[in-house]
Structures are given as C-alpha cells and as structure tokens.
C-alpha cells in the first residue's frame, strides 16, 4: 500500500474517532437529505403536483403522512421534491461562486500591488450593496428563471468568497515554502495550484459549507417573497409561502418546510464547526 493511501486511511480513522454524537447526527441528517433529494422521483410517494384530495390542509393519515397542502397535494412528496430543487440550486450556486471567488482571490494575493488593490476595491464596492436588495433588483428586471437565480446569487456570493480566499492566500504567500518556490523560478499559476491551494483546502471547505447554507437561506427567502422558484415547482421557501394560511386552520403544513430549512442550516453549521476545530487542532503539528 502506498504512503498516500496509508495517510488517507489514517486521516479517515482520526476523523471518525473525533466524531461526537451531535456531529454524527448532523452528518447522518445531511446524508439523508442529500439522498432524498437525489432520488426524489423514486422516494416520494406521489407526484410533485398530484392532487389527492379535495380538502385543504387535511391532517396526517396512512395515505398522507404529513397531510395535504392548500390544494390537496401530499405535503411529504412536495417536501422531498422541494429539498431536491433547493439543494440543486444551492450546490450549483456555491460551486460557481467558489470557482470564481477563490480563483480571483488567489490571483489578487499572488500578483499583489496594483492588481490586488483594483480587485479588492471593486469587490468592496460590490459588498457595499445590500445582497437582498441587489438580488431583488436584478430578478425583477430579468425574471426569476433558474439561470437568472443561479447567476445572480452566485455573483453576490462570489464577493464574500473572494474576501476569504484573498485573506487565506495573502497569509500563505509569505510562507517560506512559497518563497522557496519563487526562488526556484516557479510561475504564479504553479505556486497557486501546488502551494497555496493545498494549504488552504480545510478552511475553504469550511467556508464552502457556510456559503452552501447561505445559498439555501437566500433561495428560500427569495421564493418566500415570490421571486425565487415559481409554482408549480416547489422549494422549501415556496412551500412556506403557499401554506401560510394553514396556521389559521390549526394545521402544521407550513412548519414542515420551515423546520427543514432550519434543520439543514443547523446541521451544516455543526459540520462546519467540526471541520474548523479539526483544522485548528492540526495547526501546531503542521507548524
């Protein structure tokens, strides 16, 4: 067995041994949510828009485990499909924002000087706009299709990723091993890819989790305001908005998606905190 494989197995055993009951529960919940989203058409008892009863906000039963919504559709099926849409959008948004934000942040730190100053000031200018207000203006102007939602939120989120990536890269660029690479004549691209990025992976992974949670909350907020995912498709924010009247009838239909949003956000934050604690615990050994 190679040294890399042995090291990887050792890291995995260490990570498993460090798991607390709370972190284990959070990871299991996130895995269940991810699996439910991926296989929604096979897991959901009914179709996303299938009307099963003429009664609005019908209580839980053997046929409808979480009851029906305001149109008589199965809440559980809508919830599973809603998770699928929410996670799909959040994942694409986070991947796009990280791809551009990390690339630009590391380039700014690597080149420094005027390049860094111009890129940082432009980023600061974008950060000065309230994120929700900017999103509302763009989506109101261009419509709330999936491409518009993804590009708008990813662009807004990219400014936050840029700031974190630049701060990490700036600290790494003054390390001895980076200076040694410069003396050897390595180019900026090689230094970023082989020196800076590997040493920033753990904090970037934690930031990815935070940005992913932010994307879920942002999408849900826009959908609740009527500018996100549009019916008949559903996400968690749409479900909260559609079933607000359930509270007037003593039904809990609107609470299920709201609790789903909260549970995903809390579980992701617990997982991210665990990642950060592990990376902090390793710092003395790496130094």
Image (cartoon, rainbow, N blue to C red):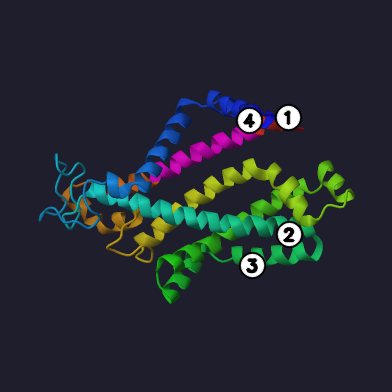
**Which mark is nearer the camera, 3 or 1?**
1
Q: Secondary structure at mark 2?
A: helix
The tag earlier along the polypeptide, 4 or 3, is: 4
In the rendered view, would you say 152 is above or below 249? below
- Residue 214 in magenta? no
**Which mark is nearer the camera, 1 or 4?**
4
Residue at mark 2 to residue at mark 3: CA–CA distance = 16 Å
Q: Nearer the viewer, residue 247 or 227?
A: 227
Task: Residue 109: give x, y in percent of width and height.
Answer: 75, 56
Question: Residue shown at 55%/37% (left/top)?
Answer: 273
Question: Residue shown at 34%/55% (left/top)?
Answer: 235
Task: Residue 174: give x, y in percent of width and height.
Answer: 82, 47
Task: Residue 160: give x, y in percent of width and height.
Answer: 60, 56
Q: Secondary structure at mark 4?
A: helix
Name the residue tied to disc 4: 5
**Which mark is nearer the camera, 2 or 4?**
4
Name the residue tied to disc 2: 108
Name the residue tied to disc 3: 125
**Which mark is nearer the camera, 2 or 3?**
2
Q: Which region shows up in magenta?
A: 262-279
């Amino acid at each position: 067995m190679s040294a890399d494989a042995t090291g990887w197995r050792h890291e995995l055993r260490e990570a498993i041994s460090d798991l607390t009951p709370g972190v284990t529960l959070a990871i299991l919940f996130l895995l269940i949510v991810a699996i439910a989203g991926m296989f929604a058409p096979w897991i959901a008892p009914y179709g996303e828009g299938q009307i099963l009863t003429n009664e609005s906000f019908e209580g839980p039963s053997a046929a409808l485990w979480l009851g029906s919504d305001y149109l008589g559709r199965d809440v559980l099926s809508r919830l599973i499909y809603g998770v699928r849409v929410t996670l799909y959008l959040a994942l694409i948004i986070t991947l796009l924002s990280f791809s551009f934000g990390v690339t630009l942040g590391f380039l700014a730190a690597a080149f420094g000087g005027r390049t860094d100053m111009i890129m940082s000031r432009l980023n600061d200018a974008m950060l000065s706009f309230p994120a929700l207000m900017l999103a509302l203006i763009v989506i109101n102007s261009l419509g709330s299709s999936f491409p518009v939602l993804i590009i708008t939120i990813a662009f807004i989120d990219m400014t936050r990723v840029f700031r974190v990536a630049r701060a990490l890269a700036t600290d790494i660029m003054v390390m001895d091993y980076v200076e040694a690479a410069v003396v050897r004549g390595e180019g900026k691209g090689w230094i970023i890819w082989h020196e800076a990025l590997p040493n920033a992976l753990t904090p970037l992974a934690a930031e990815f989790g935070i940005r992913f949670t932010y994307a879920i909350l942002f999408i849900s907020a826009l959908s609740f305001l009527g500018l996100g995912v549009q019916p008949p498709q559903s996400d968690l924010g749409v479900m909260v908005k559609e079933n607000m009247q359930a509270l007037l009838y003593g039904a809990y239909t609107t609470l299920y998606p709201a609790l789903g949003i909260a549970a995903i956000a809390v579980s992701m934050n617990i997982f991210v905190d665990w990642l950060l604690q592990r990376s902090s615990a390793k710092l003395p050994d790496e130094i």
